[in-house]
Structure formats: C-alpha cells, structure tokens
Image (spheres, grey):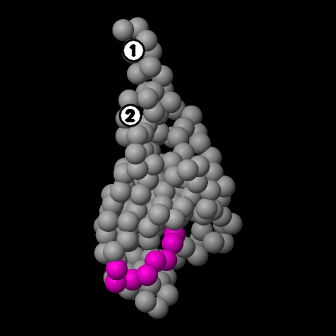
Amino acid sequence: MQLVKTTILASIIAITTGCASVNMAPENASKAAKGFSPPSKDMAGMYLYRDNSIVGSGLKKDIWIDGKCIGETARGVFFYKEVKGDREHEVATESEFSPNTLKLITESGNHYFIRQYIKLGLFVGGAGVEIVDAQEGMEEVAKLRMALEGNCDN
C-alpha cells in the first residue's frame, strides 16, 4: 500500500512541477504566425497549443497531424501548420498508455485552434486534445511562443 501511495504522490509532483523545454522557432516566425493571416489557397491553418497552465509543466508531449510528427509540446508553446482544406484530418497526442485523437473536417481559408491539455495519469500525466473556438484560441496563442516542428520522441 505504501508503494502505491508513493507512486501516486510522485506522479502528482511530476505533473504539477518542473518546467519542460523544447526548441523554439525564431521570434519573427512566432510573430508572423500570431498575425493570423489567411492560410494559402485551398489550405486551412491549424494552431496546436498548450497553454501556460502549471499542471503538467514538467512534461513534454508529442503531437501529430494525420500521423506526421508536428513536434513536442511544453508549457506555453504552439505550432502552426497548414493542411489541405475541405477534408478530414486527425490530430493525435501521446498519452499515458495510447494516443488520444481528435478528428475534424477543415474548410479551406479557415483557422482551427486545438488545445492540448495535461491530465492526471496512473504513472505519469496523460494528454488530450480539444477544439477551441477561434476567439479563445487567438487570445491564448497570442500569449505563447512558437516551437520548432519535427522533434517527436515516438
């Protein structure tokens, strides 16, 4: 019983403390993405972000679009990726035991905001993804820094 309590306590501490870091994009690229310019012709824009919540700040979590690594998230970062418009896409994030996914149909010319959130897990924190409305998404992304793409652990 003591081992279980110790494991749970260690998990909670790992999820709520620390500060993970990832490679960041140049400031001018981050600033340009935060301009929310329309995506290229026949494309949709996806903002994938993790807010500044203290929960899970010591964890990095991979995120993918359609099976392609976008990168590792950390507290206070976002990615911007253009995808083909007018089709279904799958956004996935690593979690404790298996990826959590979200499917959405994008429309050309629109931006989509997907928030990755950290949740309590059995041994380490898990992660999930959810669609956020454009106004809230723009307000959140404006406070964050853009990470470099392409560095997934898995």
Secondary structure found at label 1: helix
Give the left or right position of residue 55, taking residue 153 as reference. Answer: left
Residue 83 in magenta? yes
Residue located farthest toward the bottom when viewing the structure as drawn: 41
Query: What span is in magenta?
Result: 80-87
* One can see residue 118 in this view: no
Going 45% across and 33% down the picture, which residue do you hit?
Answer: 124
Q: Position of residue 149 (x, y in %)?
A: 60, 63
Q: How many numbered marks appear? A: 2
In terms of depth relative to the viewer, which is nearer, 153 or 82? 153
> Left or right: where does residue 103 sit relative to residue 65?
left
Give me the disc on residue 121.
2
Callout 2 touching callout 1 (CB < 8 Å): no
Residue 146 is left or right of residue 13, and the answer is right
- Horizontal and vertical percent for residue 128? 37, 50
Q: Which residue is mark 1?
A: 5
At 38% from the left and 29% from the top, the residue drawn is 122
71 up-or-down from 55: above or below: below
Q: Is 78 placed above or below 9 here? A: below
**45 or 145: nearer the viewer:** 45
Residue in front for this viewpoint, 14 or 122: 122
